[in-house]
Amino acid sequence: MTSRALNVLAAFDQENPVLGLSEIARRSGTPVATCHRLLGELTEWGALAKTTDGRYQIGYRLWTLGMLAPVQKGLREVAAPYMHDVLFATRHVVNLFVLEDARALLLERIAGTAVGQPVARVGERLLLHTSAGGKVLLAYAPVSVLEQAFAELKQETRHSITDPSKLQREIVKIREQGYATTVEEHALGTSGLAVPVFGAGGRVIAALGAVGIGATPPPVQRTLPALQVAAKAIGRTLGATG
């Protein structure tokens, strides 16, 4: 029975965050009657939540359990104060991304009342090629992740990079200069700047980014130093506590 419940939960993914009963039954290979019962139990427990139109989405309790994973919990706790420093210095929304299944998982976000409305929510997984943090993770990712990302260059806005050769050139540039930018590539009206967070052995464990409102990325001269100082402090602190 546990495996069937897990199969039901596995029916949800980035492209299908909200599903109806018949869709879940089909995608999980579960008989409709059994699926209906499991959905009721999972919803009652909090793993799933019902939408206003009677469909289902992942519930908050499942997300909070995921945040107890030692690596993510430790990274969020260490990064938070430094992210607040970046917010204070730049007045931009500050995001922390980690690589998960060839996506950029928004692990933490720090925002203030005067920095604009964020376009991504904590827990959301973004395409690697359309966000500044995602581009950083892509630039330092294993070959298998690169291949998967290049195989799904979806166009989220008219500015999204969908040409593999152009994206490859950008990846080379990111590695050379140490930061990535986006200009309305994930959502119109927002642009970003992000840097890598290095862990033990020089491995990139996260991407720290700032998001600005408008078609111009946060100014590099003012924003980049703040991000770099914070990213180094996060990596250093994690190394000291690891």
Image: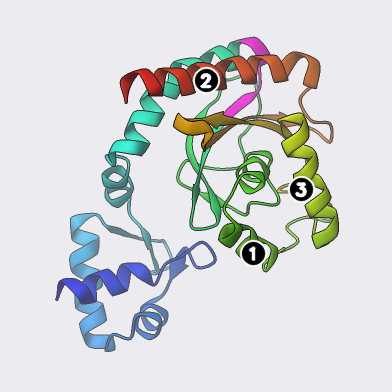
**For residue 240, side relative to residue 211 (left or right):** left
When asked about the image quadrant of residue 120, the answer is: top right
Report how far apart the C-alphas of labels 2 and 3 lie in the structure.
23 Å
Q: Foreground residue, 93 or 180?
A: 180
**Residue type marked 3:** Glu
Disc assigned to residue 91: none
Q: Look at mark 3 in the image and give the residue it sits on.
A: 185
**For residue 140, side relative to residue 96 (left or right):** right
**For residue 61, side relative to residue 223 (left or right):** left
Residue 105 forms part of the magenta stretch? no
> Which residue is located at x 24 percent, y 62 percent?
43
Q: How many marks?
A: 3
> Which residue is located at x 20 percent, y 74 percent?
3
The secondary element bearing badge 1 is classed as: helix
Q: Foreground residue, 225 or 51?
A: 225
Residue 91 forms part of the magenta stretch? yes
Q: Are marks 1 and 3 in contact (CB under 8 Å)?
A: no
> Which residue is located at x 60 percent, y 14 percent?
229
Q: Look at mark 1 in the image and give the residue it sits on.
A: 147
**Residue type marked 2:** Met
Query: Residue 16's spot in the image, x, y percent?
Result: 50, 68
Report how far apart the C-alphas of labels 1 and 3 lie in the structure.
20 Å
Q: Earlier in the sequence, mark 1 or mark 3?
A: 1
The secondary element bearing badge 3 is classed as: loop
Instruction: Please provide the residue range marked out in magenta.
Output: 89-94
Q: Look at mark 2 in the image and give the residue it sits on.
A: 83
Q: Pointer 1: residues within 10 angstroms few (<14), some, or many (20+)?
A: few
Q: Earlier in the sequence, mark 2 or mark 3?
A: 2
Task: Give the residue at the far front of this rendering.
Answer: 201
